[in-house]
Image: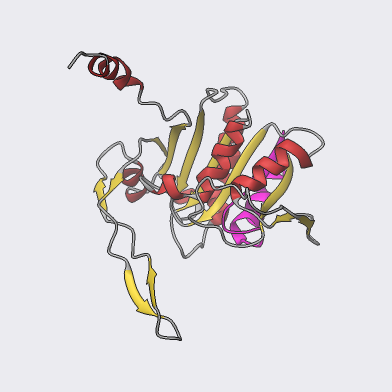
Amino acid sequence: MRILLSNDDSVFAKGIAILFETLTSRHDVTVIAPDRNCSGASNALSLHSPLRIQQLDNGFYSVNGTPSDCVHLGVNCFLEEDPELVVSGINHGANLGDDVIYSGTVAAATEGRYMGLPAIAVSLTSHEGKHFDTAARVVLDIITKLESHPLPANQILNVNVPDVPYDELKGIKVTRQGRRHRAEAMVKAKDAFGREIYWYGPAGAEQDAGDGTDFHAIANGYCSVTPLSVDMTAHSSLGTMEEWLNKKI
């Protein structure tokens, strides 16, 4: 299978290198990834500056843009043949619950789906990053299963893997997104010239983390696989909204 591999931690990240090494054992993989860390970039596109692509000594392609730029450029222009699958990761840290809205890792996968391709985002749920090989093996397993069970046309998979040896995984849980409390307050400081600056504070604590959520699966040693819809329409609200919007006042 032809796979386009990207991420948001940069083309130099350990996670993407290990995932490439694992996937190439069975698949034809091209890496196109940002030239710097783009965590939190979400679905941003570089509309006001030109994109440049450079091949590195290891064969990976580096782009001076966002994760979404990398996938869009690869599929729409750069690659001679369209990939059959887009994989984004392995992210260094979890993408659980509300994180997916901001995640450049998930955004790269989403861009792949917008380009008409099935896509997977994968994250290792620890900043220690000891067992990227575990997440890589999980992705390889999932890709094998997708070959006989294709994803629906409006969905991607968001995969989160505990940072443990592969043999210590308890299994895979299909989950829904959990939810966090409101994020911590921003941190106010001063730069070297005495001017006020602000840093984002820590992510909010888990609020909806019960059985069935991605948070719960990870906390209990399972790999979490969440199908995400790229169609953000609230279909359940269409009928009632039609009714009250058209109601005479």
In the image: residue 173, left or right of residue 30: left
Identify which residue is drawn at 48% across, 42% down.
Answer: 159
- Front residue of 199/119: it is 199
In the image: residue 41, left or right of residue 200: right
Please say whether residue 22 is visible from this viewpoint.
yes
State the image quarter where residue 196 is shown: bottom left
In the image, is residue 25 part of the stretch drawn in magenta?
Answer: yes
- Front residue of 103/88: it is 103
Please say whether residue 21 is visible from this viewpoint.
no
Task: Residue 144: give x, y in percent of width and height.
Answer: 61, 32
Q: Tell me the quadrant of the picture where the C terminus can be found.
A: top left
14 over 41 or under it: above or below: below
20 over 9 or under it: above or below: above
In the image, is residue 80 part of the stretch drawn in magenta?
Answer: no
Task: Residue 128: give x, y in percent of width and height.
Answer: 47, 65
183 over 71 or under it: above or below: below
In the image: residue 157, left or right of residue 85: left
Identify which residue is drawn at 66% across, 48% down.
Answer: 22
Identify which residue is drawn at 62% across, 50% down.
Answer: 46
In the image: residue 199, left or right of residue 134: left
State the image quarter where residue 174 is shown: top left
- Front residue of 180/244: it is 244
Q: Residue pushed farthest bottom?
A: 193
Q: Which residues are drawn in magenta?
A: 1-27
State the image quarter where residue 57 is shown: bottom right
Task: Residue 175: give x, y in percent of width and height.
Answer: 37, 35
Q: Residue pushed farthest left?
A: 249
